Image (cartoon, rainbow, N blue to C red):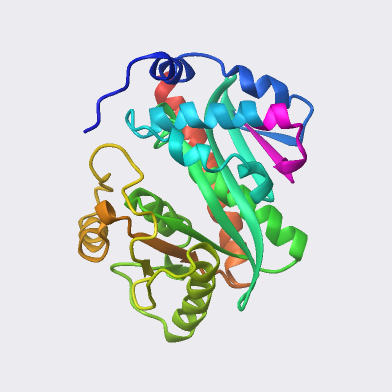
Amino acid sequence: MSAARTGPQGSAAAAISAGPTPELVALEGVGSVRRRGRYRLRHIERPGTLPRHVQDALLDMITRASEVMFDGADTARYWDERRDYFEQITDWWVADRDGCLAGWCAFVRWETPAGPALYIDTLGIMPRDRRSGIGTVLVTEAWMRRCIERRRAVVMTMRIQSPLILRMVLRCAAPWSYPRPGFARRRRTDRRAGAIAAHAAARTSPGFPFDAETFVIRGVFGRKLYGGPIPRTGVPALDDWFDRHLDIERGDALIAVMALTPVTVPIGVFVLLAVRLDVLRRERQRDA
């Protein structure tokens, strides 16, 4: 496991987990805001239009937060290579609790062979807010909003290295999520999911080998992105599948797909309500 870094940046990373996040103050009056229990969610469309100094401050906040999330791993190089991060995405959702950063999720709106899609560019949750349900809330809120805008089911996809993210995907929409260890295959949905995964691999990882059976992209990152050992989900079938099919140390990544259909929209509403209630339940347990 990586040791937490010392020095100015290590101190700043520790500070971001200990108190209110000043960079979020600059977002007052920007975007739309809603409450989910103790969490405040802010949605900003076209964040690349924010003033440059605001984008830079938020990116520095994300860099420091990433160090905390990944157990002191140095993610500065990754974020230095993405100084135009906010210009690359179309939607940014950020959550805070009592003014403290809780997490964020960034999306890109795509058109794919399967219709409109949301590509999840990045998803980060602070350690103290993990297992609170806020990551699922961020994703499902964004998905429902996009479905309403397009008046149809919108598929979601992402490129990941963590089995924890795949577990979240399966939690949201297991029968329509791919890959899905432990679930029976469905031929028609398999073809649709395969088309989405191939499209996502071509857009995000051109030139890298893509396995159409497992949705694994070989060596795309060139290294493991996360500090410490590969996280475990506690679901043996899922952890074993990840270990068998991905070489994280060499930079393999996985395209995860939620091949949602019109019939899943009502189910999605139910999942969203269930997750909101679960967030409230966990907050009551923390207070008890």
85 vs 120, nearest the viewer:
85
| Residue 108 screen position, x and y as percent | 63, 55
* Residue range (magenta): 40-55
| Residue 37 visible to an observer of this rendering | no
Q: Quadrant of the N terminus?
A: top left
Q: Is residue 287 left or right of residue 58?
A: left
95 vs 16, nearest the viewer:
16
Q: Quadrant of the C terminus?
A: top left
**Could you tell me which residue is drawn at 63 percent across and 41 percent down?**
93
**Could you tell me which residue is drawn at 39 percent across and 37 percent down?**
131
| Residue 27 visible to an observer of this rendering | yes
Q: Is residue 9 above or below residue 110?
A: above
| Residue 85 screen position, x and y as percent | 61, 43
**Could you tell me which residue is drawn at 54 percent across and 73 percent down?**
199
150 vs 1, nearest the viewer:
1
Q: Is residue 204 left or right of residue 238?
A: right
| Residue 62 screen position, x and y as percent | 53, 32
Q: Is residue 142 above or below residue 147?
A: above
Q: Is residue 215 above or below residue 279?
A: below
Q: Is residue 185 above or below residue 18?
A: below
Please say whether residue 53 is one of the residues in the magenta stretch.
yes
| Residue 59 screen position, x and y as percent | 58, 32
271 vs 136, nearest the viewer:
136
Please state the total of marks drawn on the protein image.
Answer: 0
Q: Is residue 151 left or right of residue 288?
A: right
Please say whether residue 46 is one of the residues in the magenta stretch.
yes
**Could you tell me which residue is drawn at 32 percent across and 50 percent down?**
223
Q: Quadrant of residue 60?
A: top right
